[in-house]
Amino acid sequence: MRPNILDPLFVPLTSFSGIGPKTATLVARAMGRESAEEARSVDLLLLPPHRLIDRRNQPGVAFAAENAIVTLKLHVDRHQPSPRGRPNVPYRVFAHDDTGEIALTFFHARQQWLEKSLPIGETVLVSGRMEWFNGRASMVHPDRMALESEAAQFPMIEPVYPLTAGLSAKVLQRAIEQAIAAMPALPEWLDPAFLARHRLPGFNAAVAALHAPEDPHDMLPNAPARRRLAYDELLAGQLSLALVRQRVRKLPGRAVHGNGEIQAKLLTALPFRLTESQRSAVSDILKDMQAQERMLRLLQGDVGSGKTIVALLAMAACVEAGGQAVLMAPTEILARQHLATIAPLAKAAGMSVELLTGRMKGKERKAAVDHIESGNAQLVVGTHALFQESVTYKDLLLAVVDEQHRFGVHQRLRLTAKGTAPHMLVMTATPIPRTLVLSAFGDMDVSRLTEKPAGRKPIKTATLDIDRLDDVVARLKDAVSNGRKAYWICPLVEESDLSDLMSAEQRQQALQQTFGALVGLVHGRMKSTEKDAAMESFRSGRTRILVATTVIEVGVDVPDASIMVIEHAERFGLAQLHQLRGRVGRGHDASSCMLLYKGPLSDTAKARLSIMRETEDGFRIAEEDLKLRGEGELLGTRQSGTPGFRLVDLSAHGDLLETARDDARYILEIDGELSSQRGAALRLLLYVWRRDEAIRLLRAG
């Protein structure tokens, strides 16, 4: 049970005035939560603003520069409403100060509201972007307006938060203010000497300061409030990882001694020979599993480096020893894909395979669960449904988790909490620099697959200005007429007023004018069944071009797709571009990747695109990405609603990561059950950062 003191932090978004069910969904999306049900008040408190609007510039009308954000103190002279029946003509309010006159311009305005907000003859404050037409000053839709008598409520400095289509900044700002007002006073969980040494504020003060920056410096990662909250986030992560390790040590592992017979059959059935790093990884894993202690190993390998085969050989050793092994994937598409890879090889080696996903119901599900419980299913592939309460294993020796950043510590904990103590192998397709391995996985042993499998051809990468779109479509026409398949990636799902980016739905319609029914569409907001159907059409060749959002970045395998077009490539992080490019180059054809960008490019975007042209080495790309962009992209891209870090920026907070890891270890050495006064406060920290699963582990002993 969550302590009552935290109740105000976990109220649903709809409990705030101005937020109904529809708005709650938009707010949740802006905060990177999957749904309104999952989002809570605490998510508002820990949502950092990403920039600042400074309204302190008050030059007077005549001296206000074009495009500058200014605040003006004006005398309102007259209103000029839109003519009747012509709502497209703007409503204008004319005003002046000592230096000159200005027209405040409003489209689709409500006359009553404007007459109340800007009464004739009154002095008002207005703030917004300045524009000049033929020597006349204008401001279209001022951001802020107030009567002079209400100047105290007029914010001269205003934080700006990430938004999503349909969500207004004012609604989000008001919700954050309500969440801050309801914050309970929490006991301090950090060591007082540490706080004093680093000159960090208390938690409540840090949250308040996060949302009330007074200067651009307050927005920097090393501002005291941000540093304090970043340390809290790192400590919560390291503490939950340390609790996993503590729990892992409590449950002794079972030594797995295979006789090598099934593995030998598998190797014979493979159409290629293992690479050197695959052989080395298999050897490390088998050695780990032969010990009494449970294996906890991370298998890192670039897209297409052959991680699944390494995992399959480890699973085969468990079957040889008379046990079972599972492979857990983050989505049903991926689980079925793994099944398609594994099933023919397993059959050739004489192993039985079962699939179990959340969508299976009734007799089909019961049959699968019975096979698992009886031990008839030696290998089981599935989604998190594999670890629901109703699923019992006869003798589970190994769990392989296809991390893909969609599984956090939580799911790995759930697996441990079942009381079974299988060895654990976590696979990730993103090459992660060492600091990030520490932050995401704690002290796991790491195996890296560094070569590409034999027969993989290099991918030719080119960057093109989006103005040359017609050339790209013409080249695509030739390729499709020669029987080739292409992905076309867009950054958005549907058209938005806030953005000039081409949405996936629009792009599909535009391409259908040239290619007709050969163009498919897949994006994250589609139902699973629709996504599966769209993928199947592409795989089978009924469609030849698949327009998609980044939903296809993870694990989708269509070997004969050889062209990748990424629209607005400047909007994507390096690791994400690398993941997307890795979807091609898997078959026999030479493959190409076209990165379309809209200039002018920022220095960071230029650097990203040139690195993509220069190298396909995932480890180099990961290191460069960390330098250029920070860890958000590497540990779960925000576009896919993944819980990466909220306030941590590892390029600025790397020193805090090591400290947090040492602190977490020390805490558990002296207070393993978190039962002391500080321990009780640290339990609150784990709840605040949504690490409750770790607390359940404590209760489970």
Image: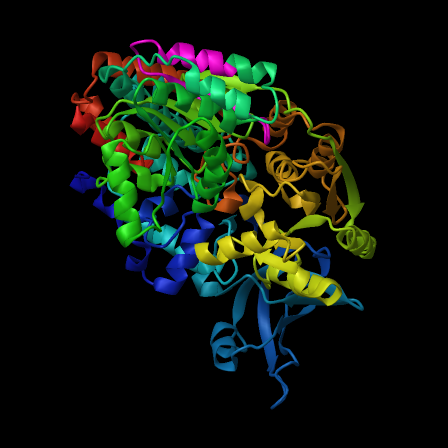
* Quadrant that contains the N terminus: top left
Q: Is residue 216 left or right of residue 660?
A: right
Colour convention of the picture? rainbow
Residue 314 drawn at (x, y percent): 42, 20
Residue 147 drawn at (x, y percent): 48, 66
The image quarter containing residue 74 is bottom right
Please say whether residue 307 is one of the residues in the magenta stretch.
Answer: no
Please say whether residue 282 is one of the residues in the magenta stretch.
Answer: yes
Q: Note whether 515 is above or below 650 in the view shown.
A: below
Q: Nearer the viewer, residue 109 or 369?
A: 369
Residue 118 drawn at (x, y percent): 52, 73
Q: Note whether 369 is above or below 421 in the view shown.
A: below
Does residue 507 appear anywhere in the picture? no
* Quadrant that contains the C terminus: top left
Q: Nearer the viewer, residue 86 or 289?
A: 289
Residue 287 drawn at (x, y percent): 41, 9
Q: Which residues are magenta?
A: 281-305
Q: Residue furthest bottom?
A: 84
Q: Nearer the viewer, residue 30 or 367?
A: 367
Q: Is residue 232 left or right of residue 544?
A: left
Kindly identify the residue that appears in the image at 63 percent across and 25 percent down. 453
Q: Note whether 130 is above or below 312 in the view shown.
A: below
Kindly identify the residue that appears in the image at 55 percent across and 44 percent down. 51
Q: Is residue 150 left or right of residue 494?
A: left
The image quarter containing residue 608 is top right
